[in-house]
Image (cartoon, rainbow, N blue to C red):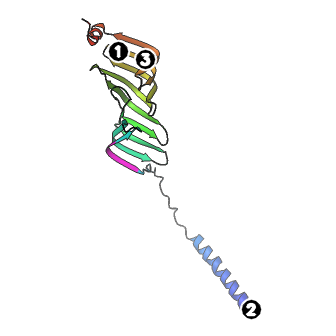
Amino acid sequence: MLANTVRNGVALVAVAVLTWWGVNQVKQPAVRIPAVAMPPHYDLYARNFVVTTFDPQGRRARSLRGERLTHQPLAEQAEVRSPALTLFPSAGEPWVVRAATAVVPDRQDTVDLQGNVVIERVLDSGGKIEMFTRNLQIRVQRQTAETRERVTIVHPQGMINGLEMSADLAAGRFHLHRDVHSVLDPPRRAAAEGVQ
């Protein structure tokens, strides 16, 4: 009995060694899978969308519309193509901010607008304020904006140009920090004020 167990064990080891040797003798080319860049993983996609949020009193607080919205959970952000962000201050007409793209980080109160940013507001007097810059970050709850880029502000009394801007959109105040130049148009200003 012991002899049969030893013979079976030796036979099993011999079969394993021969199988290993046979596999190693057959040379097969290594299969290589080319590296492919993985597309970003989206968990939300919307086209031609509008999202409006309201304050506790039921008044519109802000609205975001865009051509396309994609949300990437791994990056924890949403990207918007052709965004138009409308902020409704407690007094006065709304501010509308447009850009080529926007990035909206998850769990943050910011919107980063990039490329051909235009901010505009129709004034109670019927005129319009327009601001032009390349990039802008807006803190949505506070309705503030800032950029380190060059800004051009066109308003009924003329034009102001400068570098780096901080703005309180709710209060309608702007501060250009450096290299500020302005061109005022007194005849248009007098007409806007009703002076002849």
94 relative position to 9: left or right: left
How packed mark 2 is, by other alpha carbons closer than 10 Å (few <14, some 14-19, many 20 or more), is few
Q: Quadrant of residue 172?
A: top left
66 relative position to 43: left or right: left
Residue 3: numbered disc: 2
Q: Quadrant of residue 92?
A: top left
Residue 114 higher or lower than 37, as above or below:
above
Q: First in sequence, mark 3 or 2: give its number.
A: 2
Identify the magenta region: 44-50
Magenta part, dominant SS: strand
Give the Cα distance between marks 3 and 2.
98 Å
Q: Residue shown at 39%/16% (left/top)?
A: 161
**Kind of element beneath mark 3:** strand
Q: Position of residue 83 (x, y in %)?
A: 35, 36
Q: First in sequence, mark 1 or 2: give its number.
A: 2
Q: How many marks?
A: 3
Whether 159 is among the magenta residues is no
Residue 186 higher or lower than 50, as above or below:
above
Give the Cα distance between marks 3 and 1.
10 Å
**Kind of element beneath mark 1:** strand
Residue tagged 3: 162
In front here: 4 or 48? 48
In front here: 4 or 192? 192
Q: Position of residue 162 (x, y in %)?
A: 43, 17
Q: Position of residue 75 (x, y in %)?
A: 49, 45
144 relative position to 67: left or right: right
Do the residues bearing badges 3 and 1 touch, measured as CB atoms within 8 Å? no
**Kind of element beneath mark 2:** helix
Q: Amino acid at mark 2?
A: Ala
Q: Nearer the viewer, mark 3 or mark 2?
A: 3
Q: Residue most toward the left? A: 196
Q: Residue shown at 63%/81% (left/top)?
A: 15
